Amino acid sequence: MIRTRGNRYGHMVLRGGDRPNYDAMSISLCEKALRDKELNVNIVIDCSHANSFKDPDIQPLVMQGCVHQIMEGNMSIVGFYGREQPKMGKSAYGR
């Protein structure tokens, strides 16, 4: 077995799944899971994909939710990002 010191800059990206997962409860559960595995509690929120129901118009609301949590004292959210997507839905690669 090889053991390393790990990547202190590593982070968990929350993109949503069956439902958005940028809310305070989802963040808290993620923090606990990371602590339980003795990993850095660094979380980045993807404001697109399932967190915005793949609707670019909703991304600013997701960002506002992230900013609100940070302003309320959350220290584990280390970043968030959105995507410029001219059309709703999936991106077509190779076309």
Image (tube, rainbow, N blue to C red):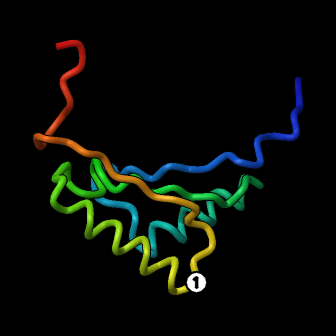
Q: Nearer the viewer, residue 9 or 26?
A: 9
Badge 1 local density, few (<14 within 10 Å), some, or many (20+)?
A: few
Residue 66 left/right relative to 3: left
Q: Quadrant of residue 95?
A: top left
**Relative height, residue 36 to residue 88 (above, below):** below
Q: Nearer the viewer, residue 94 or 3?
A: 94
Residue 62, percent from left and from top: 31, 66
Residue 91, percent from left and from top: 20, 30
**What's under tag 1, amino acid-wise?**
Gly
> Element under label 1?
loop
Q: Residue at x 14, y 41 (%)?
A: 86
Q: Residue at x 19, y 62 (%)?
A: 58
Q: Nearer the viewer, residue 89 or 71?
A: 71
- Residue, far left: 87
Residue 23 left/right relative to 20: right
Residue 29 left/right relative to 42: left
Image label count: 1
Q: Which residue is mark 1?
A: 73
**Relative height, residue 19 to residue 27 (above, below):** above
Q: Quadrant of residue 43?
A: bottom right
Residue 3, percent from left and from top: 89, 31
Q: Residue at x 66, y 57 (%)?
A: 34
- Residue, far bottom: 72
**Relative height, residue 9 to residue 76 (above, below):** above
User: Which quadrant holds the N terminus?
Assistant: top right
Residue 52, percent from left and from top: 24, 57
**Relative height, residue 87 to residue 42 (above, below):** above
Q: Residue at x 28, y 47 (%)?
A: 49
